[in-house]
Image (cartoon, rainbow, N blue to C red):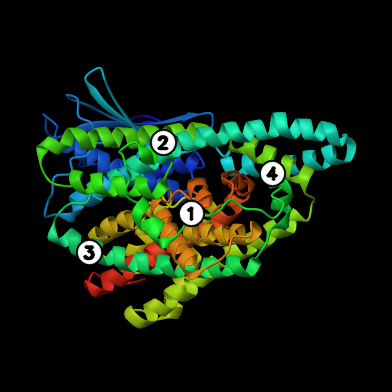
């Protein structure tokens, strides 16, 4: 029942009508179709969670739409005692729907908020974010930095340039790097624990999840190797050497198989955070995550605490990331003062080769479907080529996850319950697009700073990047890896500005791999129905 233009009384009996009302009003607000699908998915998950604990039946809730400064929010409210569906109950259950429900909400936690007020449970869903995008601001910072650097180099004395660089540009970069490293390691730590502790111990989930992880890690390894080869072919970025004034000398690298094995176990529980040691952080997170994944009510309080810290550190990182456009401008200004416009050629080659990961992914996925799938590779290629425009344009695999599920169900004929589990879980392990361009950058840095290559070093680099890829963070998690390679951690500042351009094909690449992994496992598990 509709009470006014932007409010609707929702019950189980009129749920279909409410979805029609929601689609109509969100379309009038110019909300993109994939975000409408996301709103419907999150509304369904939260509405039925509230209905299951309601004191009165039939259950009734109110949904309303609110638009402020270009942001569109959907509010779901219902009378009752305090119950937060965003605090996940992860007790093992033979029904994989329980797991998929938790994983879906976790994937979208940054779009959800809960509060209890006036004896009402209220959930807000951020359906649409203002088009004042971070990508546009970052690219603007890139252009302004290039222009400012050229102007300073042409019209300002060398002594003044050096003063500006040392006291202003370097100082701002150091402040940002310290703030970034302050929160990145804890964020990865709590996020990985959250992902592992959510794994139920059910036989179904272990079998399906094991296959998904196996497929994903094999493909991830392949793309890291290809990325390293491409980085080897691109070679040196001599302009960066001018910035760091290395004079041919490098800090001795510590990366080796022995050091990787020995150092992965921290000497104390605090050392991964004090030293910002990424592999030790992952080891500790895996260990704690496995312990928390054991069933039992005595673990619930710890899981809720970890969930909170994961959300909190991600929010803090989001605040720090708002400074990225400024930092990009500063980094590009310094680069243009110390180097010249020829750096743009190196960036162009990097972006071009990073974008090649997407067509390579389409070819590899088509070949795997031809070998193990139930549809022709050309049919698969035609369907997925039309779909990946969405992840390419959004640069966010979480935002397009409902559309990804819909594609798998309607176009590839995969069962709904299977898709809800496999796609949401697969997001953690199918970060091939990000791993691909990170591997390219790593090898470019190795050549730029004259690091001696050996089989031991290359193997260690591969393993380190494989672990790094599982964090799903991308470039901002690279400083500790660069440090172990004998490369200044500040070098990463000169790639943050172009990451949005690499992330667009990278996101489409990762989503393609997620779909492919899910489809191959669905074929093995006989979870394929009719296709369109």
Residue lying at 65% horizontally and 58% vertically, measured from the top left: 448
Residue lying at 35% horizontally and 69% vertically, measured from the top left: 412
For marks 4 and 2 on the same chain, the one whose residue lies earlier in the sequence: 4
In the image, 324 versus 1, the foreground residue is: 324
- Do the numbered discs 1 and 4 sit on residues whose CB atoms are within 8 Å? no
For label 4, count other residues whose C-alpha is less than 10 Å away and answer few (under 14), some (14-19) or many (20+): many
Query: Measured along the vertical axis of the image, is residue 371 above or below residue 219?
Result: below
For label 1, count other residues whose C-alpha is less than 10 Å away and answer few (under 14), some (14-19) or many (20+): some
To which residue does mark 2 refer? 274
Q: Secondary structure at mark 1?
A: loop
Looking at the image, can residue 405 be seen? yes
For marks 4 and 3 on the same chain, the one whose residue lies earlier in the sequence: 4
Q: Nearer the viewer, mark 1 or mark 2?
A: 1
Q: In x, y percent, where is residue 169? A: 69, 34
- Do the numbered discs 4 and 3 sit on residues whose CB atoms are within 8 Å? no
Q: Secondary structure at mark 4?
A: helix
To which residue does mark 3 refer? 208
For marks 3 and 1 on the same chain, the one whose residue lies earlier in the sequence: 3
Q: Is residue 143 left or right of residue 327?
A: right
Question: How many numbered circles does the render carry?
Answer: 4
To which residue does mark 4 refer? 142
To which residue does mark 1 refer? 254
């Amino acid at each position: 029942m509709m009470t006014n233009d932007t409010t609707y009384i929702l019950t189980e009996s009129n749920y279909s009508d409410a979805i029609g009302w929601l689609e109509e009003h969100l379309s009038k607000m110019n909300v993109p179709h994939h975000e409408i699908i996301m709103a419907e998915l999150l509304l369904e998950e939260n509405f039925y969670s509230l209905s299951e604990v309601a004191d009165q039946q039939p259950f009734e809730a109110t949904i309303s739409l609110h638009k402020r400064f270009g942001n569109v929010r959907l509010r779901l409210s219902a009378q009752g005692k305090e119950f937060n569906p965003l605090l996940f109950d992860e007790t093992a259950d033979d029904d994989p729907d329980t797991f998929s429900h938790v994983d879906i909400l976790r994937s979208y936690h940054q779009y959800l908020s809960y509060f209890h007020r006036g004896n009402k449970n209220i959930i807000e869903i951020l359906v649409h974010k203002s088009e004042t995008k971070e990508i546009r601001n970052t690219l603007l910072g890139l252009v302004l930095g290039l222009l400012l650097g050229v102007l300073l180099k042409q019209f300002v004395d060398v002594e003044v340039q050096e003063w500006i660089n040392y006291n202003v540009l370097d100082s701002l970069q150091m402040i940002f790097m310290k703030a970034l490293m302050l929160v990145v390691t804890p964020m990865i730590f709590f996020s990985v624990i959250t992902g592992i502790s959510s794994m139920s111990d059910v036989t179904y989930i272990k079998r399906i999840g094991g296959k998904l992880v196996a497929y994903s890690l094999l493909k991830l390894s392949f793309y890291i190797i290809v990325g390293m080869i491409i980085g080897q072919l691109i070679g040196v970025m001599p302009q960066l050497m001018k910035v760091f004034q290395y004079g041919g000398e490098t800090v001795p690298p510590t990366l080796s198989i022995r050091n990787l094995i020995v150092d992965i176990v921290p000497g104390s529980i605090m050392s991964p955070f004090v030293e910002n040691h990424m592999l030790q952080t992952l080891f500790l997170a895996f260990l704690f995550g496995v312990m928390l994944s054991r069933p039992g009510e005595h673990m619930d309080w710890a899981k809720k605490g970890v969930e909170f810290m994961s959300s909190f550190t991600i929010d803090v990182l989001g605040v720090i990331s708002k400074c990225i456009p400024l930092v990009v401008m500063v980094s590009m200004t310094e680069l243009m003062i110390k180097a010249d416009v020829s750096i743009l050629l190196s960036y162009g080659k990097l972006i071009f080769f990073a974008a090649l990961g997407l067509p390579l992914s389409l070819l590899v996925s088509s070949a795997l479907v031809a070998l193990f799938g139930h549809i022709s590779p050309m049919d698969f290629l035609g369907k997925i080529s039309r779909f990946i425009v969405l992840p390419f344009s959004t640069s966010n695999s979480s935002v397009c996850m409902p559309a990804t599920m819909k594609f798998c169900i309607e176009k590839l004929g995969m069962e709904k319950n299977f898709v809800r589990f496999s796609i949401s879980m697969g997001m953690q392990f199918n970060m091939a697009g990000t791993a691909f361009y990170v591997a390219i950058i790593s090898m470019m840095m190795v050549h730029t700073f004259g690091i001696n290559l050996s089989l031991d070093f290359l193997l260690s680099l591969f393993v380190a990047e494989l672990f790094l890829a599982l964090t799903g963070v991308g470039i901002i998690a690279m400083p500790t890896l660069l440090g172990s390679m004998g490369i200044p951690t500040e070098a990463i500042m000169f790639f943050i500005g172009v990451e949005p351009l690499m992330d667009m094909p990278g996101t489409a690449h990762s989503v393609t791999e997620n779909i492919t992994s899910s489809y191959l496992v669905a074929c093995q598990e006989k979870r394929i129905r009719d296709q369109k």
